Structure formats: structure tokens, C-alpha cells
Amino acid sequence: MAGQTQGVVIRKNPDSCLVYSAGDHLLCTLAPRKKEHHGSVSAGDLAVGDVVYLRPAGSGQGVIVGAEPRTSLLRRRSATPMPTARAHEQVIAANVDQAVPVFAAANPAPTWNMLDRYLVSAEASELPALIVLTKVDLLYQAGAEAEAQVRQALDDYQRIGYRVAAVSAFSGEGVDALRQELQGRSSVLLGKSGVGKTTLLNALQPGLGLRVQEVSSKTGKGKHTTTSSEWFPLEDGGAIIDTPGVREFGLWDVDQDDLAWFFPEMRPFLGGCKFGLDCGHDEEPGCAVRQAVMAGSISPRRWQSYLRLKEDA
Ligand SMILES: Nc1nc2c(ncn2[C@@H]2O[C@H](COP(=O)(O)OP(=O)(O)OP(=O)(O)O)[C@@H](O)[C@H]2O)c(=O)[nH]1
Ligand SMILES: [Mg+2]
Ligand SMILES: [Zn+2]
């Protein structure tokens, strides 16, 4: 749109958006629908990461008049607060080019099924994923068995083809290498409260000074310190979206029948099942996926994870 300023939605408020445009932060409202052309966008539809067009409206303010089509969209199914309430789509971020699931080596302990949920969502949105293990300083104190378990799980993911970065914001280990993986791209940090997403962002880009908070010593859970998603430009190019920790991550718009396709290590076997596309890859006779699990080419834990996810896809 010629003659209009472009910006990125960096935070959403109930009735407005904070937009980053040419180095400035502008508090923006949306132009009333009938008066101006919005493309297909309405206020509720805008997401952090959206590229918008605006016109200035006084100091530090603007009006959003349109938005660019998105290159990607990451969504989850929101938790239903009441049994009667219907699950609905929750948009996490727009226009990211990689999903970054974040897990702590300990405190809180990693939950691999949740990681598989993030990875399936990334696959469903056709986004590459970079798995980040934080708090590796704690891994060395966790004992040999706990450390071996975490390393084994990470090896499994690397064998599938996912990139894995192990970091400690405290010791600095792995931070420079991770910065390289993030440079020039737009990434979204995903993970439970307390895994250290915001601490990591502070370590990657000193000077941000974002608020972080200790994990509860009683429950081992995070305190939901970050309360809304926010987009940060990186000094070396690219951007990171920090998100509030979520307890659950439901799959949105992933069909049961497509689920196996979103486990990349299962793809080569999907044509080989006796029941073809009708195979649920569980106890069906002649299932090539189950045979691959037995033969050791697919991790039994990932297969179990697939079966669990199938129940709520
Ligand atoms: N030992 C250790 N602790 C860390 C590390 N990174 C973060 N922490 C601690 O983990 C706690 C939680 O960190 P946050 O950055 O607030 O976690 P978060 O994932 O942003 O949590 P939410 O905003 O609630 O989603 C803080 O007490 C941090 O100091 C690390 O590398 N090593
Ligand atoms: Mg945070
Ligand atoms: Zn099968």
C-alpha cells in the first residue's frame, strides 16, 4: 500500500496493538471497518508478528488501516475453562519462520509429550523447529541417570532431523551458538512457565532487562511471569517472540488422519501399511510404522506420543 507506513504488531491489548515501525513504538487502534479498507483483517484477527499498514495519529499513536497476508501462522487449541465451553483457536504468532520449543533440563523437568505437541504444530504450520534445552547447568547436578535420559531424548530428536541447542543463561554455555541459529530469522519461543524463555532472551540480547521470576520451590512450577506475547527485534537482524508459558498445548486443526505425517520419522513407512491410509498405526495387522518401532528405526517413546496425540487430535 503506497504512501502508508509499515510496521509489525509487537503486542496485543484488548482494544489496541503496540506496533513497531521504523524504530518507534506506536500505540495503534484499528480504523473503523466501513470507512477504510482493511484487507481481510479485523482487530480480533491481528496477531503478534503481523505486518500492518498504518497512518500516524498524533504523538506515539497510529491507526491500522490494513495488513499484509501472512507467510505463516502458529495456533493452538485453547484450554477450555469450563466443561461446557467449546475449545477455540488461539493464535500464537504470525509470520515466524521457525518454532523454538524451550525445555529446561530440570526445574521444571522436561515433558517430552509436550515437546511432541509443539513439533506437530510446527510441522502442521510447515515451520522448521529448533529445540532448545535451557538450564543445562542444572543437568550436571541432576545425577548421571537423569542426565543420560535427557541426552538420550535429545539424541532421538536429532536423529529425526530436528536441530537441538543446549544452553545455560547462567553459565553462558551455548548462548553464542544459539544466537547464530536465531540471527536473521523470526522465531517464537514456546514452552511451559518457568523453563527460562525470558531469561534466555535477556541473555541473547543483554539490555532488554525483561522481568523473570523464580520457579515455585513448593510446586516446581513457573509463576506465569510473562503475561502476553511480545515481539523483539534482534540487534543482528531477525526477531524473537517471547510468549507466556502455557500449561497445555492442544493441537488445532490437525486431523487425526494426518497426524502420522507430522512425525517426520514415520513418513517413509506410511505407504507400507497393509490397510494403507486407513491404518491408525496402532494394533492394526501389517502396520509398517509399528514394525519400524519394533525394528528400532522409530523411537517407542515417540510412537507412544503419537498414539496419545491421536486421542485428542
Ligand atoms: N539454573 C538456571 N536457572 C535458570 C536458567 N535460565 C532461567 N533460569 C531461572 O528459571 C526461572 C524462570 O525463568 P523465566 O525466564 O522467568 O521463565 P519463563 O519461561 O519466561 O516463564 P514464564 O514467563 O512464566 O512463561 C528464573 O528463576 C530464572 O532465573 C539457567 O540457565 N539456569
Ligand atoms: Mg517469561
Ligand atoms: Zn500403520
Image (cartoon, rainbow, N blue to C red):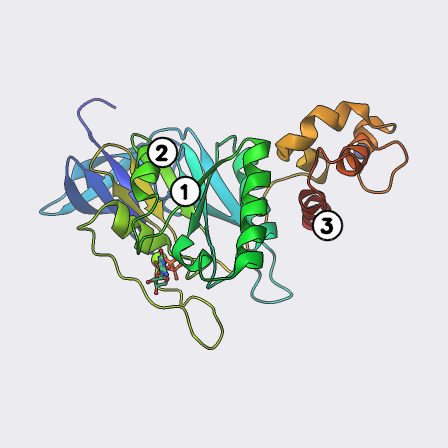
* Residue bearing mark 1: 93
Q: Quadrant of the N terminus?
A: top left
Vertical comparison of 6 with 254: above or below = above
**Which label lies toward us, 2 or 3?**
2
**Depth order, front residue of 13/130:** 130
- Mark 2 to mark 1: distance in Å? 19 Å
Does residue 3 lie above or below 85 as drawn?
Answer: above
- Ligand 3 resides in the quarter of the picture at top right
Is residue 234 visible in this depiction of the protein? yes
Question: Secondary structure under badge 1?
Answer: strand
Front one among 57 and 203:
203
The residue depicted at 45 percent of the width and 39 percent of the height is: 99
Point 33% across, 66% down: residue: 213
Q: Is residue 296 left or right of residue 31?
A: right
CA separation in Å, label 3 and label 1? 26 Å
Dot placed on the residue nearer the N-terminal end, 2 or 1: 1
